[in-house]
Image: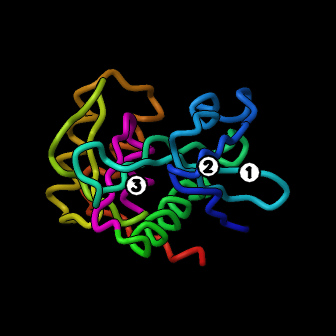
Amino acid sequence: MEFALLGWPDDSHPLYLDHEQFAYAGKFVMTSTGKAVAGDDGPVAAAAFDEDRTDPATLVIRYVTVRRDRKGERLGSRLLRFVREHATGRAYDRLTINVNNPYSYQAAYRAGFAFTGEEAGIAELTLEWPGKRGAKRYRNGLAVFEQRELTSAEERFLAEKREGGPPDVVDSPV
C-alpha cells in the first residue's frame, strides 16, 4: 500500500473521488485543502486538511474517507498517522480532527489522537494530537456516543469498547 501527500492547503490541489464509493467525495474537489491518499492503483483512502484559522501551528483534518469496499482495514488510521507525521515535519505542533461516529473516533485513536473533552459542529467530538490518551478520557468520548441514536452495529461496537482503554497506535506506514 502506497501513501502519498498530494499537496498542502496552499498548493490548490483538487482530488476527484467516485461519490458512490467514497463518503464526502465532493469535499475533496475543494482546492483550499491539502490532500493525502493511500492506495496502489488509485485511491482507497483520502484525507483533506488545512490550517486552523486562529492558530497557524495547528493542522485541522477536515475529512477522512475510505472506499466502501475497504472499510475495516485500518486504512483511515494509517492515513491519519501518515498525515500526522508529515505535518510535524512541516512544523505543525498540534493536529485536530472532529469525528461524528464511534468508528471514526476509534480510527483517530489508533492514529494517536485523544479526545479533548470538547464537542464541535453538529454532534462531533474533537480529538487532538498530541493529547492525553488515558482510559478514562477515551471512555468519556465513547459515553458521549452512547447518548445518541445509534445503529445496532454501533451499539455493539461501543459495548465491546466500553470497559477497555484506548487502542494501540498503528505503526507508521512509511
Q: Amino acid at mark 3?
A: Ala
Q: Which mark is residue 99?
A: none
Nearer the camera: disc 3 or disc 1 = 1
State how far apart marks 2 and 3 are (Cα).
14 Å
> Which residue is labeled 1 in the image?
43
**Would you identify the image quadrant in which residue 142 lies?**
top left
Element type at marker 1?
Answer: strand
Q: Position of residue 121 (x, y in %)?
A: 28, 28
The label shown at residue 108 is 3
Residue in view at x 62 percent, y 28 percent: 26
Relative placement, left or right, of 128 versus 77 is left
Region rendered in magenta: 92-110
Q: Are marks 2 and 1 in contact (CB under 8 Å)?
A: yes
- Specify the label residue 46 is tagged with: 2
Kindly identify the amino acid type of the residue bearing the numbered disc 2.
Ala
Helix, strand or loop for disc 3: helix
Measuring from the top left, give residue 129's x and y in whole percent: 29, 63
In three-dimensional space, the C-alpha distance between marks 3 and 1, rounded to whole angstroms, equals 19 Å
The residue tagged with tag 2: helix, strand or loop?
Answer: strand
